Amino acid sequence: MTTSVEVEMKRVKKKVVGLLVLLVSIGSFYLLKQVQKHGKTSQQETKQKYIDAKTEKPTIHLFDDNKFVFVAQKDGIGGIAFGQDYISVLDVHQKEINQSMIDREKNGSPKIAKDEYFNIISYDLNASGFPGKKTEVYQLLGKKEYRGAYDISQYYADNKDYIPVTLYKVGNNDSRKIIVDITNQKIEDLENFEDYGKSTFSAAEQELSKGNVYNNIRQAMKEKYHLKFTAGYIDTLLSKEDREKIDISNTNFAQDYPEMAKDIKNLARLYMRPKQYSTKEWFDRVLHWFAPKGQDVLEVYATDPNTGEKTQIKSYDELQAWSSNHPD
């Protein structure tokens, strides 16, 4: 016969068991949620990130018998290659590789996926409206081991435009450099170009440096207009503050080319095409373009290094004559 004590004990046991079952259920539910949460976090952490680099088509002007090119790029500087026949930019979509160096060396270079691309978009200066054509570098390479660096420059040789591209192999940090023939859309061996890396305008700089004229004109362009002059082109100083100060409204250039003058604060480069380039014409044009409106030339002077005497230089021919009378 069951006593009242035994009945009470059974009730207590049932309550304890029920409580334990409840606690286990709650704990399991919480653990499941944590696992699910952790799993989602891991998926989010391992989700592949991509880096995109795309430069929109710049504003392009050809002028003066198509010898000179004015290129404007809104909202920024960089990402443009300036050539004889093409203005080129990058359009790139690549994986962001965040592995440590040890992991990269152990795991090797992640293969380039189908959705990755490294394209050069080139705008044809010899066609109406400057239409673009796409050079797919990864398709030309064939092997999918190297990824391209996010920079672009131009190299002119054999009457053709080339784009040098630095490639990196992620696994062992190996790198190589190729050169892309934009005209024929093929890859060339860099070793075939003996003059690659040499300054294109070094001889012109030496010519213009007589009597410190080169530095004199650079200083004048910077102080008056916040522009940077070189022996082959003009562009802007890098700081946003300097770009905002650019004002050429009172120059012959603004009077002769008002549409281009409107874009001067977005100037990417003003240059003479390589095939047509001559130091004489470039120097003479710049002196006239950036003279105060109505005047013939921008004031620049040659300085005798021995006496300090200054002589105004109004043309390339005058500089040559001065140089002949002041041999080093």
Image: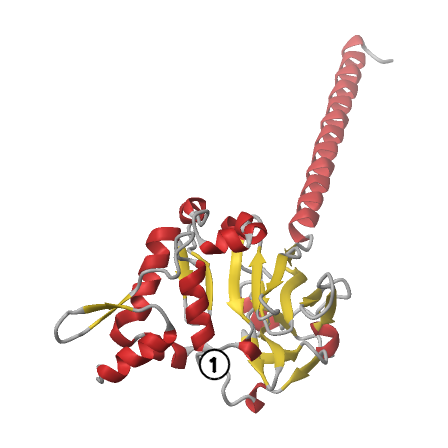
Rendered residue at 40%/64% (across/down): 287
322 w.r.t. 189: above or below: above
- In the rendered image, the quadrant that contains the C terminus is bottom left
Q: For this view, does 310 lie left or right of residue 252? A: left
**Residue 315 appears in which quarter of the rendering?**
bottom left
Rendered residue at 76%/30% (across/down): 25
- Residue 26, given in percent of the width and then of the height, sits at 73, 28
**Residue 148 appears in which quarter of the rendering?**
bottom right
- The answer to whether residue 176 shows anywhere in this view is no
**Residue 169 appears in which quarter of the rendering?**
bottom right
- In the rendered image, the quadrant that contains the N terminus is top right
Q: Which residue appears farthest toward the top when viewing the image?
A: 4
Residue tagged by mark 1? 197
Q: Secondary structure at mark 1?
A: loop
- The answer to whether residue 184 shows anywhere in this view is yes
Q: Which residue appears farthest toward the right when viewing the image?
A: 1
- Residue 141, given in percent of the width and then of the height, sits at 70, 79
Q: For this view, does 143 lie left or right of residue 87? A: right
